[in-house]
Amino acid sequence: MAENAWQGDIAIVLSVSGETPPTLELAAKLKKSGCEIIAITSDIQSPLSNMADFQLCYFMKQTRIEEMINITTQIPVIYIIESLSKAVMEHGKTA
């Protein structure tokens, strides 16, 4: 990605743990290219949360099978995304 290619844009990055290497790599590239990062994660102390410009945490206990398979519910994330969408739409009506 070219430096400043995403200047002024915002990326919403989703990760339950906030520790997934490919997600962190992409978020770092976006940030380096001028994009602001909003992290939605269940861990406010995660690397993704620490890297982000804004953090939205839903504090769900992570549920794993055999340490590698994360089956933590995503219902809070869907609610957050829907709420953000509605807020943006409402702001657009008043702008």
Image (spheres, grey):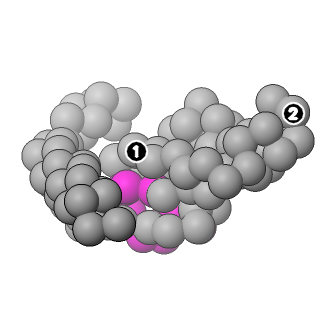
Name the residue at the right extreme.
3
Q: Is residue 3 magenta?
A: no
36 is higher (above) or lower (below) than 95 = above
Q: Which mark is residue 15?
A: 1
Location of residue 29 (image quadrant): top right
Disc 2 element: loop
> Mark 2 to mark 1: distance in Å?
25 Å
Q: Nearer the viewer, residue 94 or 2?
A: 94
In the image, which disc is placed on residue 54?
none
User: Over which residues does the magenta segment extend?
Assistant: 39-50
Give the image location of residue 76, x and y in percent.
15, 54
Q: Quadrant of residue 71?
A: top left
Q: Is residue 32 above or below residue 36?
A: above
Would you say 1 lies left or right of 54 here?
right
Task: Name the amino acid type tagged 1.
Answer: Ser
Q: Quadrant of the N terminus?
A: top right
Query: Residue 43: within the magenta?
Result: yes
- Residue 40 placed where, x, y %? 37, 55
Question: What residue is drawn where x is 62% and y is 57%?
Answer: 36
Q: Which residue is mark 2?
A: 2
The residue sitting at 44% across, 67% down in the picture is 55
Q: Depth check: give the residue in front, 45 or 66.
A: 45
